[in-house]
Image (tube, rainbow, N blue to C red):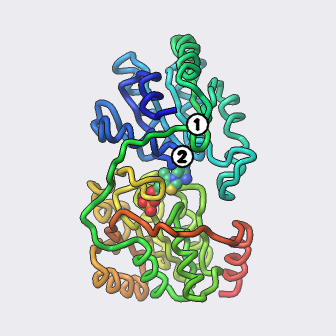
Amino acid sequence: MKALKLLEIIGSDFYTGVPDSLLKAFCNCLMSKYGTDPAHHIIAANEGNAAALAAGYHLATGKIPVVYMQNSGEGNIVNPSASLLNEKVYAIPVVFVIGWRGEPGVHDEPQHIYQGEITLKLLDDLGIEYFVIDKDTTDLEAVRAMESFREKLNDGKCVSFVVRQGSLTDAAQVEYKNSNIMRREEIIRRVVRVSGADPVVCTTGKASRELFEIRETDGQSHKYDFLTVGSMGHASSIALGVAIFKPNVKVWCIDGDGAALMHMGAMAVIGSYKPENLVHIIINNGAHETVGGMPTVAANTDLVAAARAFGYPNALSVDSFEELDVALERAKRAKSLFFIEAKCAIGARRDLGRPTSTAKENKEGFISYLKEI
Ligand SMILES: Cc1ncc(C[n+]2csc(CCOP(=O)(O)OP(=O)(O)O)c2C)c(N)n1
């Protein structure tokens, strides 16, 4: 069905969430209809934040909000669903729209497989009734589903549309761009040129796919890299764990702005412990580029000031390859925690591949390498 039709059928005037490639048509409709006008549409830092923001909208207006997300964000809504929205607590009605990656029987990447298996079960456990939208769902069926949802919503219950791959169509064309010049893949190439044989923990999405391909084309081992293929927002904490327990090894974290914002508390903890051997790089394109380019708030956030405020002793921002190379060399030699924001254009190579080894092979190679060094 058409994404715009689903918006009409739900009929809310407030939407918040974290974008998803499977919901690209839905997100693009919201962007072309509302942009990021906070009266109607806010892209949240994480899905739990979106659920809480939706609760605030309901408290202030008495109306019913919509929270959209990829099913990987279900984990982030468990706590606010169970302890804020649930009818045994405040009974705050929310309509969730969830993209179903890793649906059993549909080929997908390793990070989506188990989450895909438990997607509906988790909703059951959270007491959230759902309707699955697939390619054959008619507008009338969606209208009927929404009618039956209304009764539940009136009782303060949450409901969900779970969207199968390829089911929402007719995306409004939205162009996402900024004025930065550096490309993410080239930034990563320069990071690994300087990091050499040091371990690298890389964030979720295309950054890890690009890192994998760079190692392939340069004929280097993948043993240096831990690819945080799922668990968006947690790469820097993984890197912190490695850095603390491998104090004589320089550890590099390649992070994304969307990911860093998602669990920004991690930076406060890193800045507080100040591991001397950690370099934290945020590639800031101000966008969730991997899932379509929808904006994050990072284009308007002073990440360097944030890092400094969190206690990082060295923090700087670069927006050219010359500055980046200088900053990376400084970070390599530094004897204290280092932060680099690399301002980046939105976009990626069309023919970008995916890791050809399994997640477990990646982990085992990384563990053996950490034992060696
Ligand atoms: C908890 C969670 N929510 C949403 C997603 C879907 N997702 C994968 S990558 C991505 C965007 C990441 O944005 P950013 O960190 O800025 O990196 P970029 O894609 O711009 O390189 C999103 C939203 C996810 N994997 N996990």
- Assign the C terminus to one quadrant of the image: bottom right
**Marked residue nearer the N-terminal end (1 or 2):** 2
Of 332 and 273, nearer the camera is 332
SS for tag 2?
loop
SS for tag 1?
strand
Label 1–label 2 contact, CB within 8 A? yes
At label 1, the amino acid type is Val
Position of residue 178 measured from the top left corner of the image (x, y, whole percent): 27, 60
- Using residue 189 as the reference point, say whether residue 353 is left or right of it: right
Disc 1 from disc 2: Cα separation: 8 Å
Residue at 45% in and 42% down: 25
The residue singled out by tag 2 in the image is 22
Residue at 33% in and 66% down: 345
Label 2 packing within 10 angstroms: few (<14), some (14-19), many (20+): many
Of 289 and 269, nearer the camera is 289
The residue singled out by tag 1 in the image is 163
Position of residue 172 measured from the top left corner of the image (x, y, whole percent): 37, 42
Label 1 packing within 10 angstroms: few (<14), some (14-19), many (20+): many
- Using residue 160 as the reference point, say whether residue 5 is left or right of it: left
Residue at 69% in and 44% down: 103
At label 2, the amino acid type is Leu
- Using residue 19 as the reference point, say whether residue 229 is left or right of it: right
User: Ligand 1 closer than 8 Å to the CB at disc 2?
Assistant: no
Q: Is residue 64 above or below residue 316?
A: above
Quarter of the figure with residue 7 = top left
Of 127 and 90, nearer the camera is 127
Q: Quick check: can you spot residue 355?
A: yes
